[in-house]
Image: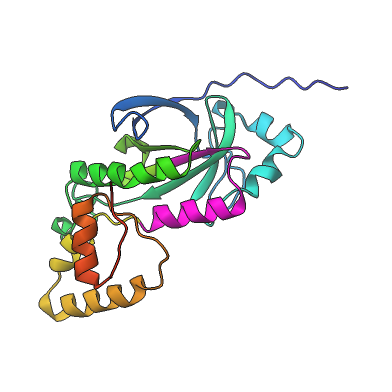
Amino acid sequence: MTVIAFPRVTDPSVRVRSVRAAGAWTTWNISQNLTDRWGEINSFQAEKKPLGELIETDGLLDRLRQQMWREETFIVRKDGCFGVLFELEFCSRESEEGNTDDPRQYKPHPDVVEALLNGMKPLAERFPGVEFAVPVESAIIHDRPAIWAFAPDGLLDQQQRNELGAALVCTLQGEDYFLDLLPESHRAACWKTLAERAAEVDLFIAPSRYFGDLMRERLGFPLLKGGR
């Protein structure tokens, strides 16, 4: 049997606000962006990544590629364990300063982060073994708030990946604030379209019971699952 020795690469430290730690700051040791969102190897700064182990370990890369979900995941290594990272970016007033004509349409960064953390609480209960966090803004392009959900290799089956991805994508976190800032000529039409299209969604996760109740009323839903 041939034993392959890989160069020792330490997973870099990134500050995150962890759902497991009730939103407190903690550290994830994570090698990010080993691939792009389509599963192709990202060789940028390859000397700082565990790419040799990922590529040369029999079946590992192909197996992880099968566990990716649409274009919302990357292959990563966290604490020495390979897996898939769900990453979804959001906008805040601060992150879009200079990138849009009216950043007031977005909520302040701290409010967005709190909404994301609250929205992920029920997901942490629903998907044990998946780690949820909001990374420090400097880890994301334009310093945007984002959701991270790390699923170790082999933890989730295809149905569970679909359910987790859909739940993250359909997190409610401030649609009322954005739509109510639109001109009256567009506001009513947007609310009507949102209500019509929302009927196609299987599950919404609201960051709080208050916001869940608010959106249920605004969208005309008989039931909308909210935060707990």
Tell which residue pokes out farthest to the front in this image. 222
The residue drawn where x is 22% and y is 52% is 209
Residue 141: give x, y in percent of width and height.
35, 44
Res 174 seen here: no
Q: Is residue 95 magenta?
A: no
Asked whether, in this view, residue 204 is left or right of residue 42, the answer is left
Q: Which residues are magenta?
A: 149-170
Count of numbered tags? 0
Q: Is residue 153 magenta?
A: yes
Decide which of 103, 67 is in the foreground and name it.
67
Asked whether, in this view, residue 164 is left or right of residue 144, the answer is right
Res 163 seen here: yes
Residue 217: give x, y in percent of width and height.
19, 68
The residue drawn where x is 11% and y is 77% is 184
Decide which of 37, 196 is in the foreground and name it.
196
Which image quadrant for residue 171? bottom left
Decide which of 136, 190 is in the foreground and name it.
190
Q: Which quadrant is home to the N terminus?
A: top right
Residue 193: give x, y in percent of width and height.
29, 77
Query: Is 113 placed above or below 187 here?
Result: above
Asked whether, in this view, residue 52 is left or right of residue 151, the answer is right
The residue drawn where x is 68% and y is 29% is 53
